[in-house]
Structure formats: C-alpha cells, structure tokens
Image (spheres, grey):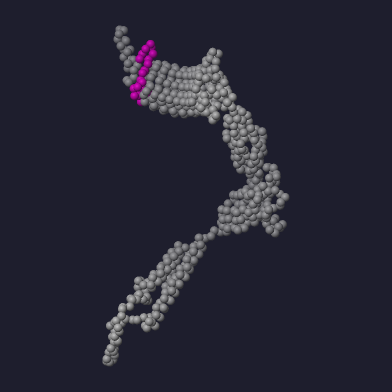
Amino acid sequence: MAPPLLLLLLASGAAACPLPCVCQNLSESLSTLCAHRGLLFVPPNVDRRTVELRLADNFIQALGPPDFRNMTGLVDLTLSRNAITRIGARAFGDLESLRSLHLDGNRLVELGTGSLRGPINLQHLILSGNQLGRIASGAFDDFLDSLEDLDLSYNNLRQVPWAGIGAMPALHTLNLDHNLIDALPPGAFAQLSQLSRLDLTSNRLATLAPDPLFSRGRDAEASPAPLVLSFSGNPLHCNCELLWLRRLARPDDLETCASPPGLAGRYFWAVPEGEFSCEPPLIARHTQRLWVLEGQRATLRCRALGDPAPTMHWVGPDDRLVGNSSRARAFPNGTLEIGVTGSGDAGGYTCIATNPAGEATAHVELRVLALPHGGNSSTEGGRPGPSDIAASARTAAEGEGTLESEPAVQVTEVTATSGLVSWGPGRPADPVWMFQIQYNSSEDETLIYRIVPASSHHFLLKHLVPGADYDLCLLALSPAAGPSDLTATRLLGCAHFSTLPATPLCHALQAHVLGGTLTVAVGGVLVAALLVFTVALLVRGRGAGNGRLPLKLSHVQSQTNGGPSPTPKVHPPRSPPPRPQRSCSLDLGDTGGCYGYARRLGGAWARRSHSVHGGLLTAGCRGVGGSAERLEESVV
C-alpha cells in the first residue's frame, strides 16, 4: 500500500502548483518558483503552505490583500523587477512569519501607512531602484524591533521617516545612497548601536550634524561594532560645522569639498583643520524705524550675512520670542510680517542672527499711529462708522464759519470726477509728520483715506462719482506724541462739495453736428458765389466781344426783300487761326469743361453736407442745425 500512497501525495502536490511555476518540496518546506514567467498578477492558486515564493522578473503591477491571504508560513517573498506601482493597504497582512521582502526594481512612488502592515517579524526590506518620493511616518511601525537590513537607495527621497529609522535597535545596514536628501536631523542615528554600515553616497548633503554614531569608526578595536561610513558624492561645505568630522581622521575615504571657493575640489581629509573656518553673522541691512497706521500691515526686514547662513529670530517688545501665529509670521530669511497692527504691537523689536561662529543683533522701532475716530456715540459699540466724518464735517463747517472768514480746507476746480483740495500751512508751532484726507460720498458710505506728505498743501482727488455730494476732512498727524495717544492726530478742517453731473453725450454730439454743418454751409456758399461770378463774366464777354473775337460764319442766309444779294468781300487767304478752347457755357450738363469741374465740386460739397448732416442727425439728437433740404438749397 505504500507506493500508491506516495503517488497520491505527489499527485496532490503537483495539482497545487500553478501551471507556469515550478514547485519544490524539500525538507518539509515548499518553494514556489515563478520567476521569468510573464505573469501579470500573482497566481491565485499558489499553495498556501508555501515557505518561499519567487515572483521576480515578471509584469505584476499591483498587490492586494487577496494575493497572499492565509500564507502565514511564508518566510521569503521576492517581487523584484516587476512593474508594481501600488501596494494596497494590508496587502501583506497575513504574512506574520515573513523574514525577507524584496521589492527592488519596481515603480513605487510612495508608501502609505498601511502599505507594509502585517509582517511583524520582518528582518530584510529591500526597496532600492524604485521612484519613491514619499514614505509615510508610520510605514515601518510593525517591524521596528526586528528589522536588520533596510535598503532605500536609488530613489527620489528628500525626507525619510527619521523617527522610525532611529527607533530600530537591531538595524545593521542602512543604505540611503543616490537620493535627494539635503539634511540630516541632529541625533538621527544616536540610538542605532548595532549599525555597522551607513551609506549616504550621492545625496545633496552640504553638512552633517554631529552624531555619536560616527565616532565609532575611528577606533575599530575599542568599538564593538565599527561603523563603515560613506558620504562621498555630496556637495560638502567645508567650514567649522564639519570640523568634528574632519577630526575623525579617516584618510581611506575619497570625499571632496564643494565649497567655499578656496577649498572646492580638495580632498576632505587632506584639508588642515585650521582651514575649516566660519564667519560670524553680520547684519547687512534692516528696517530701522517703521510707522504704520492702525490696522495696516507692518513688515520688518532684517538681512544677515555669515558662514554658515545665520538663523534669524525676532524678539518682541515684551521680550518674548515672536513665533508664527494668526497675526504674525516670521520667515526664515529674516522678515517679520504683522498682518493687522494694533496699539499693542508698537515698541522695539530685536532681530537676532546666529550661527556656530557667533551672533549679531539689530534694533527696529515700530510705531503704530492710531486712526482718528469721531465722537459720534450713535455708532454701534462705540466704534466709528462711515457717518462720523459727515457729522464732524458739519460741526467743523459751522464752527469755522463763526471764527474765520476763510475756511482752513477748500475744494476747488471741481469737475465731474475730480477736485483739488488745498489747505494752509497751519500753526508753525505744531510739527506735522503727514496729512490724512478722509472723505465719503452720498453714493457710498465707505470712508476713503488718502495720505499726503507734510510738505504738500494741495491734493487732487480723482475717480469721484459724478453728481454726488462729498464730505471731506483734513487731519494732521504729529510724530511727537506716543503711538497710542489720540492727541497725536489733529483735525485741521472739513469741507463739503458736490461734483458736477456727467456731461450728456447728446450735447457733445450736437456741438459736433453744428460745427460740421456750419463748415459745409460756408463752403457751399463760397462755391456758389464763384460759379455765379464766372457765369457773369462769360455772359458779358459774349455780349460785347464780337469785335475782339473773330467769328467764322458758314451757311448764312438773309432776307433782302427782293434786293440783290450783296457780294461777299473776298479776303486773302491766311493761315487758319489756332483752334480756341471750348468756351464754358451755362449748360451744366456738360461735364467736360471747367464748369463741369465747378459743378462736380459743388455737387461733392452738397453730397458731403447731405451725408454728414443727415447721418449725424439720424444718430444724434433731432432739431439740430436745420433740415437737409435747406442745406442743399444754400449750396446750390
């Protein structure tokens, strides 16, 4: 009975192996080998008892939870060199015995928090040769205590989950080479006591923060696990920040300096320690004093130079560090921006620039000028409203009418959209920093502010509303008082004026039509007079010019009442006289002579006057300049 039972077991094992794969059952461990099989997905009929599953060099594009369901005994999973772009949440959720996971050579762009959940005993994770640009902070949480080998090389990583990597006590090898990492957080590897190889080659690191991990590579005999550190191919900035690394004395490495210019291209370990120098910060320029109106935006600027680039901080008037909030924001370049200023923001600010070589400070004075608020108590909550200026304007106008014959503020040269505001120099004893014009109109209750320099005594208001009533007040802002003192603002006077109504388009059109019609009429009269004068000259010439102009008569017959016909006088032959030009007659139908030209000229004027007169009157207003018939009669 033994041979039939063995054949049955072999037959059952053969049936559990996917068709394109090869299955090996050696020493009670089942290996399913499906490499180079042209698979587009994980075969669904893989034996759930498989211990080793190789799916490398296929065309698998995505992984999901059904692919490895109930494979609790799987130890080694190889998915290298496929086309995997997405790993579903908990795709490896049942692989609690997995020790090695190879995902190198795929097309992964990111790893979410749940992409690698499940393998709690994972020791080797290979993710090199992908397109990873982001790894979630909790992507490695399930195997922090067990992971020994992590390979993230040849990706597009700028940041990695440093907190998770720093909490892997069993980590031996960490490959981060050929990425875009430009900074390492201080103490990122302080807890990795078992780390023996760290590869940071070909990144964008300009400096390395001091870390106790790196000192283990200096004395291999005293260290239980000497560190093999590689950081060549980075644009190292060889200044005092890297002096600690230079003192490790590792002449076997080939790192070079990329900056400063005096050290560029030199071997890192060959540069003397004295040349690893820094420059203390220097405040190049800063805002010395800034005055703003209450409610406006205040921007304080501070620029510092140094090597390395200084870190900028701001200290407020209350001697506290100014941090980012809903009202204020401090930028890394040294700019402090306060969105909406209040009286409590006024005072002295201190800009502090620090780097490893020292620090530098600068003082900035911010003054917040309180806006003048009228005393109109009818406004809700005691806050000034748009109607306050109207009330103050009326009150000031009444007061000025009894005390002075000439108002302090005048608005002249008022048009439909503009007006010239003028005022006197005021009392010389009161210093003025700037003038402020406030005005609003009957069409819009919004209060408008205009700031005018203290040296000016005129201001042209533009973009006014035609045909509207305006209330205007002029205030003088004094720099002598404190920023929160309302007496620093003095009311000089108020005025009331009205803009002209908008000019109707019909009036302008009427003036244009009248001017054109008058021009056409005068031109027509002149042409008609010229024609009459010319005709009169021709008639006079024909009536009295028989003796002057020889006339040639032919075929002349006369009646002699029966008498003999007179013998015509024979004249000697002469050369024929030159043919006279055709005389101009009153036949206006003939257009070939000079009078034809005169008639064409008159007709052109008549047609022009008719087209201009009739066209403009049709498009414009009626009853302007008379009718077309009268115009034509005057021309003819």
Q: How many marks?
A: 0
x and y percentages locating residue 587 in the rendered image: 36, 75
x and y percentages locating residue 595 in the rendered image: 38, 73
312 above or below 124? below
Residue sitting at 68 percent across and 47 percent down? 478
- Residue 627 horizontal side relative to residue 192, left or right: left
Q: Residue furthest top?
A: 1
Q: Is residue 325 visible?
A: no
Question: Which quarter shows the C terminus?
Answer: bottom left
Residue sitting at 36 percent across and 25 percent down? 59
Q: Is residue 295 visible?
A: yes
x and y percentages locating residue 343 in the rendered image: 66, 41
Q: Is residue 27 covered in magenta?
A: yes
Query: Residue 551 is drawn in which quadrant?
Result: bottom left
Label the magenta part by its dominant secondary structure: loop
- Residue 117 horizontal side relative to residue 304, left or right: left
73 above or below 566? above
x and y percentages locating residue 390 in the rendered image: 64, 52
629 above or below 402? below
Question: Which quarter shows the N terminus?
Answer: top left
Residue sitting at 35 percent across and 75 percent down? 581
Q: Is residue 565 covered in magenta?
A: no
For this rendering, which residue is in front, 73 or 169? 169
Query: Residue 573 is drawn in which quadrant?
Result: bottom left
**Residue segment shown in magenta:** 24-45
